[in-house]
Image (cartoon, rainbow, N blue to C red):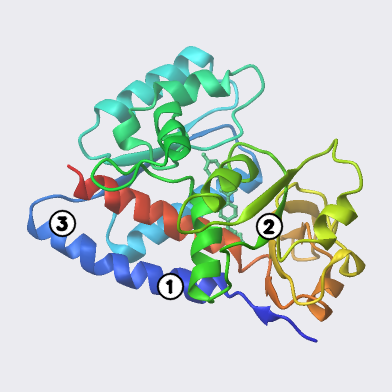
């Protein structure tokens, strides 16, 4: 068997095309959506993700405002930058790129974000609305990677209702909110949320119809762990060296041999990463439409 490729690049392009019309409609009402990014330090991965987000904005006609602080920035510097983003009328939504350097209290910084401008859905109010299952008028931004994963499954008609999903990783940006999203009414999956203390991870993966790997352990998920035909989403990325031309060599959380057993597989790169960025743009447009 060779798995159907869950093409995140093509799907993200489709989403961006849909957003372009909504952005034009906002502009005709005099509202220009603007995405702010706050990056602290010079981690090469984070620099590359932030650059990608600004490229995406340019592509769809969202203004983008970039704030970069040096790795030596104090917590007060970060507080000040967040206050400035909250006050800046050009910024209709923004993200604080994670992780922040050691010594800066990440949770405390996330609490300072104006929930109405929280493009990542990581402010406690918005995470709380995800737990409450608030939908409609007050609907909150969803964390971008979980929303991107669910959207990728939906657009490829991979059923979730009543299906068993094993999520590997309990981090703030992926595993933990993904468990909440997948168990919402309308998505209706049964979720096993695993982590570094899980006993017999292979057994938890083996009973899954859908496996989401988001831990940053290269090639952790093996072909012989899978139920044949399962859908596999490879989210983690680890820099495992450099190519001769000086580009970073990246490895996902899923062993490439999984493609022979899985029914669907998201490549990495080219899978969930571009979807994360597309859903970030959607959060920005949603927030601007609520203005
Ligand atoms: N507050 C916050 N929100 C985030 O959403 C957030 C974050 N912090 N910190 C880091 C992680 C990681 N992340 C990625 C986004 C896009 C790609 C992506 O597009 N990757 C491309 C390849 C890399 C590239 O083109 O630069 C791909 O998978 O095809 C990867 C990783 C968002 N994150």
Residue sitting at x 71%, y 66%: 209
116 left or right of 128 in image:
left
Q: Which residue is mark 2?
A: 165
Q: Which residue occupies the foreground of this view, 47 or 32?
A: 32
Instruction: For marks 2 and 1, give the CA distance.
Output: 26 Å
Q: Give percent across and percent down for residue 68.
A: 47, 34
Instruction: For marks 3 and 2, give the CA distance.
Output: 37 Å
205 left or right of 266 in image:
right
Q: Are marks 1 and 3 in contact (CB under 8 Å)?
A: no
Instruction: For marks 1 and 3, give the CA distance.
Output: 20 Å
> Helix, strand or loop at disc 1?
helix
Residue 186 drawn above or below residue 141? below
Instruction: Place residue 84 in its image quadrant.
Output: top left
Label 3 neighbourhood size at 10 Å, few (<14), some (14-19), many (20+)? some
Mark before the other along the chain sequence, 3 or 2: 3
Q: Quadrant of the N terminus?
A: bottom right
Q: Which residue is mark 1?
A: 13
Q: Give percent across and percent down for residue 233.
A: 68, 63
Q: Which residue is mark 3?
A: 26
Q: Give percent across and percent down for residue 194.
A: 76, 44
Find the residue positioned furthest to the top. 76
Q: Which residue occupies the foreground of this view, 51 or 193?
A: 193
Q: Are marks 3 and 2 in contact (CB under 8 Å)?
A: no
Residue 1 drawn above or below residue 17? below
Depth check, mark 2 against mark 1: the one in front is 2
């Amino acid at each position: 068997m060779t798995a159907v490729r869950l093409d995140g690049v093509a799907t993200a392009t489709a989403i961006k095309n849909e957003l372009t019309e909504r952005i034009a409609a906002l502009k005709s009402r005099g509202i220009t959506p603007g995405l702010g990014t706050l990056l602290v330090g010079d981690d090469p991965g984070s620099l590359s993700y932030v650059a990608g987000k600004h490229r995406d904005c340019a592509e769809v006609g969202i203004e983008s405002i970039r704030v970069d602080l040096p790795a030596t920035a104090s917590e007060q510097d970060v507080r000040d930058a967040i206050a400035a983003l909250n006050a800046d009328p050009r910024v209709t939504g923004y993200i604080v790129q994670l992780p922040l350097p050691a010594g800066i209290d990440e949770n405390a910084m996330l609490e300072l974000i104006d929930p109405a401008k929280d493009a990542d859905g990581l402010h406690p109010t918005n995470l709380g609305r995800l737990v409450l299952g608030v939908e409609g008028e007050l609907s909150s931004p969803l964390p971008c990677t979980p929303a991107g994963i669910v959207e990728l499954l939906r657009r490829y008609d991979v059923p979730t209702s009543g299906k068993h999903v094993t999520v590997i990783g309990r981090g703030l940006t992926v595993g933990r909110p993904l468990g909440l999203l997948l168990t919402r009414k309308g998505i209706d999956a049964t979720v096993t949320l695993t982590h570094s203390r899980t006993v017999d991870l292979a057994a938890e993966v083996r009973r899954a119809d859908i496996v989401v790997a988001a831990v940053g352990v290269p090639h952790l998920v093996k072909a012989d762990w899978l139920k044949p035909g399962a859908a596999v989403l490879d989210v983690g990325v680890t820099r495992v060296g450099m190519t001769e031309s000086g580009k970073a060599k990246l490895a996902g959380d899923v062993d490439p041999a999984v493609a022979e057993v899985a029914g669907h597989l998201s490549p990495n790169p080219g899978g969930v990463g571009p979807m994360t960025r597309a859903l970030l743009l959607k959060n920005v447009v949603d927030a601007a439409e609520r203005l």
